[in-house]
């Protein structure tokens, strides 16, 4: 079946992929903010259609399947002669782009600064050099897990029950009397539909169809002995010189019906736990030489200042978690020595790299940062998001359990995925800064890259949770002098939390991005294209990328908005998360580029066709401002003002006929249109003469507003979503289009600024409504 490849189709298959796990490239190794591989593949395919001037009809399987049959890749490669073309990613990170480029048959080059990311790429891309790699990796992994099971599974026998999960709370000391304070805050064990299991006020586990207790905002932790409330700051101050303790308080296991069951830890469990302490301590002493020696660097942002007592890598684990992690590393080292007797050095090394996926599993899924997701009664990763937040309670996962998250399932998933992706083409990995690429001038045909987005993710800070453990393995196996530390000075990231005191300010980011893009310009062929994904929620974030593109002497030919996240993310919408990205399509000259005014005029048509989402208007207009700045030699501030003004005028006049008089007048004034009847607004309680300004939606007195107006209905919808972000509001089909237009206007077209990162309530709720309707 063939389909027309458009931005809408690319978004749809990209969003769909976010729900997939089986045999997926991303399940091999951990990295952050990877874009959907199918979307990256489709961007390359679409670019080839444009290069060859062919209509974008493509086999659906080629663009939508996670792992299309080899025949589809082969046919595309032969039709477009991709083996003659060179594709480069200058910020390769987790390797999604090089992976898909190689599968399409391009000569592929992957450049990456961070050694942990480069190691990830070594692990995946170099596996093709080892025959029957998946089978060899599975054999070694099975040996290691069986050995670990024999040694450590006994630590998970609690009074005859073998827990899937052990729930633990952290312990601090009272600032007043030095007594122990339990920091437990976990309430729900299950929040499934028609199955709510929770701790009541007596700390008894209750199962009911709904929770009958009430929630109150947590302001601190009351000492049970003296009654003094210890604030969050008190706990943080305590952790400056101390490490928080921890205490198990409940377990999850499977009962005789193979259903999840829960019970509190009792005294007999405590006896079992205590008798294991001596054995674990002895084993930790034996493995002490495998502990990383580095001190964790305190950084700004969301990475580790909220992990109050994280001082050395081992602080991230309980003793039981740590002994299993060190035991795994010890077994990998032993397995390497065995492999050298059976295989050549290259094969032994590659298998060891594959086994680091098991280390990632324990760090990510079995640490003091691992959380319990009550909505589906599953474990949640420690390192899933852009930052690592403080956990007052956490879970220990039994890595030898019969189901759920465990070492065996991780090994199976990795080995099965290696078989499924069936990578056949070599990727050339370039390690180091992309400000100095090892290519001659005009060598590359296509650049496709996904750089760091201003201050959005501190990749080095996150990768540091894995780096020390990887280094230990490599130093004890194939490279005694291994050093995986990143070159912080060459990392394109803004650290706003420190106010740029460490040198990582906007100038630092712009300088590095300009340097990389200048190299892109140099190595790109005269008829080549550079495609760069980008998004940010602030004015400064767009200004700096626009200026970097301009200073690199590249020209923006097209701005393509894509949806890259799961559908309907109320929490993300509320917190202004990046739901969409812009693909900047750039070239080396400014000929035959569509004008920005034409782009603006066509915006609403593209929205109606579904090629641009309502929620993407804000970032799309910001991208057009970058294009306008470069094409027309403006400063970004002027270009941005002009783009917003021009689109607002078009929007007001285009939609004037669909509103009643009151609603139209209100929205026109909301968009700062001067020639409106303010008397009509005053008469309906929508304008205040005293302050000479419009009354905001969340302050309107609906008793003064006619019920038959569209604005009245919009306020009712606003209040419904404000009360409950998960509401399934029923909207009459006749009103849907109008509501979309109203909330598109109310959501605002202007970006936040660095100094004011959170949008107001109207913008938040309006964007939430748009994501739902």
Image: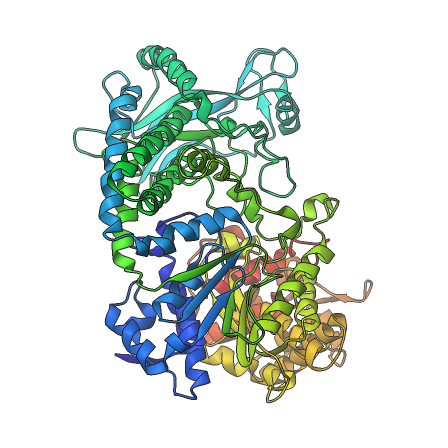
Quadrant, the N terminus: bottom left
Q: Residue furthest left?
A: 257
Please say if 661 is above or below 748.
Answer: below
Asked if residue 403 can be seen in this view, the reply is no
- What is the total number of numbered labels drawn onto the structure image? 0
Q: How is the image coloured?
A: rainbow
Please say if 384 is above or below 79.
Answer: above
Residue in view at x 25 percent, y 69 percent: 70
Residue nearest the viewer, comparing 185 with 707: 185
Q: Quadrant of residue 623?
A: bottom right
Give the percent coordinates (x, y) of residue 744: 57, 70
Give the percent coordinates (x, y) of residue 195: 31, 39
Please say if 422 is above or below 51.
Answer: above
Asked if residue 561 can be seen in this view, the reply is yes
Residue nearest the viewer, comparing 284 with 410: 284
Q: Quadrant of residue 602?
A: bottom right
Give the percent coordinates (x, y) of residue 258: 19, 34
User: Could you tell whether 688 is left or right of 470 in the image?
Assistant: right
User: Could you tell whether 23 is left or right of 362 in the image?
Assistant: left
User: Could you tell whether 161 is left or right of 465 in the image?
Assistant: left
Residue nearest the viewer, comparing 517 with 265: 517
Residue in view at x 27 percent, y 20 percent: 154
Q: Residue furthest right?
A: 690
Q: Quadrant of residue 49?
A: bottom left
Give the percent coordinates (x, y) of residue 596: 64, 83
Please say if 246 is above or below 215.
Answer: above
């Amino acid at each position: 079946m063939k389909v027309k490849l458009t931005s809408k189709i690319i978004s749809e298959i990209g969003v769909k992929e976010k729900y997939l796990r089986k045999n997926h490239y991303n399940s091999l190794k951990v990295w952050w903010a990877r874009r959907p591989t199918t979307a990256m593949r489709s961007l390359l395919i679409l670019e080839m259609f444009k290069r060859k001037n062919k209509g974008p009809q493509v086999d659906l399987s080629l663009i939508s399947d996670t792992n299309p049959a080899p025949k589809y890749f082969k046919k595309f490669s032969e039709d477009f002669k991709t083996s003659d073309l060179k594709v480069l990613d200058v910020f390769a990170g987790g390797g999604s782009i090089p992976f898909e480029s190689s599968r399409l048959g391009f000569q592929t080059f992957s450049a990456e600064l961070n050694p942990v990311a480069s190691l990830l790429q070594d692990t995946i891309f170099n596996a093709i050099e080892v025959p029957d790699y998946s089978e060899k990796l599975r054999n070694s992994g099975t040996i290691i897990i069986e050995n670990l099971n024999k040694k450590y599974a006994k630590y998970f026998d609690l009074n005859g029950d073998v827990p899937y999960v052990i729930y633990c709370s952290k312990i601090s000391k009272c600032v007043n009397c030095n007594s122990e304070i339990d920091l437990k805050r976990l309430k729900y064990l299950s929040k499934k539909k028609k199955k709510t299991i929770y701790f009541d006020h007596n700390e008894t586990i209750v199962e009911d169809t709904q929770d009958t207790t009430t929630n109150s905002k947590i302001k601190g932790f009351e000492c049970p002995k003296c009654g003094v409330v210890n604030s969050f700051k008190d706990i943080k101050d305590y952790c400056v010189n101390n490490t928080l303790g921890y205490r198990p308080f409940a377990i999850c296991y499977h009962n005789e019906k193979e259903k999840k069951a829960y019970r509190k830890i009792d005294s007999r469990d405590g006896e079992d736990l205590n008798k294991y302490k001596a054995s674990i301590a002895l084993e930790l002493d034996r493995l002490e030489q495998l502990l990383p020696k580095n001190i964790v660097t305190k950084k700004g942002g969301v990475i580790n200042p909220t992990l109050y007592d994280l001082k050395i890598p081992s602080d991230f684990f309980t003793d039981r978690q740590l002994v299993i992690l060190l035991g795994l590393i010890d077994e990998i080292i032993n397995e390497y020595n065995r492999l050298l007797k059976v295989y050549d050095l290259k094969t032994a090394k590659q298998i060891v790299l594959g086994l680091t996926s098991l280390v990632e599993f324990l760090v990510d899924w079995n640490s003091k940062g691992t959380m319990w997701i009550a909505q589906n009664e599953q474990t949640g990763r420690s390192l899933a998001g852009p930052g690592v937040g403080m956990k007052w309670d956490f879970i220990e996962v039994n890595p030898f359990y019969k189901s759920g998250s465990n070492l065996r399932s991780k090994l199976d998933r990795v080995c099965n995925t290696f078989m499924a992706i069936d990578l056949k083409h070599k990727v050339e990995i370039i390690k180091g800064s992309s400000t100095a690429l090892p290519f001659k001038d005009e060598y590359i045909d296509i650049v496709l890259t996904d750089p760091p987005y201003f201050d959005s993710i501190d990749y080095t800070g996150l990768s540091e949770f894995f780096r020390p453990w990887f280094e230990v393995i490599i130093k004890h196996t194939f490279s005694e002098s291994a050093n995986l530390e990143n070159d912080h000075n060459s990392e394109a990231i803004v650290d706003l939390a420190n106010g740029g005191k460490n040198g990582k300010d906007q100038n630092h980011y712009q300088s590095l991005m300009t340097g990389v893009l200048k190299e892109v310009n140099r190595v790109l062929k005269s008829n080549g294209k550079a495609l760069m994904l980008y998004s940010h929620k602030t004015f400064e974030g767009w200004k700096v990328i626009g200026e970097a593109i301009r200073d690199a002497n590249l020209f923006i030919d097209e701005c393509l908005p894509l949806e890259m996240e799961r559908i309907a993310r109320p929490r993300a919408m509320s917190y202004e998360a990046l739901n969409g990205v812009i693909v900047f399509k750039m070239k080396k000259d400014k000929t035959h580029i569509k004008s920005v005014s034409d782009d603006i005029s066509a915006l609403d048509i593209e929205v109606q066709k579904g090629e641009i989402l309502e929620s993407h208007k804000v970032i799309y207009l910001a991208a057009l401002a970058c294009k306008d700045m470069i094409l027309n030699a403006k400063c970004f501030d002027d270009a941005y003002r002009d783009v917003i003004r021009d689109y607002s005028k078009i929007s007001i006049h285009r939609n004037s006929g669909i509103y009643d008089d009151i609603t139209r007048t209100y929205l026109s004034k909301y968009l700062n249109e001067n020639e409106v009847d303010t008397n009509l607004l005053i008469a309906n309680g929508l304008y205040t003469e005293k302050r000479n300004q419009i009354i905001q939606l969340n302050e309107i007195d609906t008793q003064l507003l006619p019920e038959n107006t569209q604005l009245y209905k919009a306020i009712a919808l606003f209040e419904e979503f404000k009360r409950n972000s998960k509401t399934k509001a029923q909207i009459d089909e006749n009103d849907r289009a109008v509501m979309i237009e109203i909330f598109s206007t109310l959501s605002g077209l202007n970006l936040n600024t660095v100094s004011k990162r959170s949008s107001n309530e109207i913008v938040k709720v309006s964007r939430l409504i748009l994501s739902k309707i």
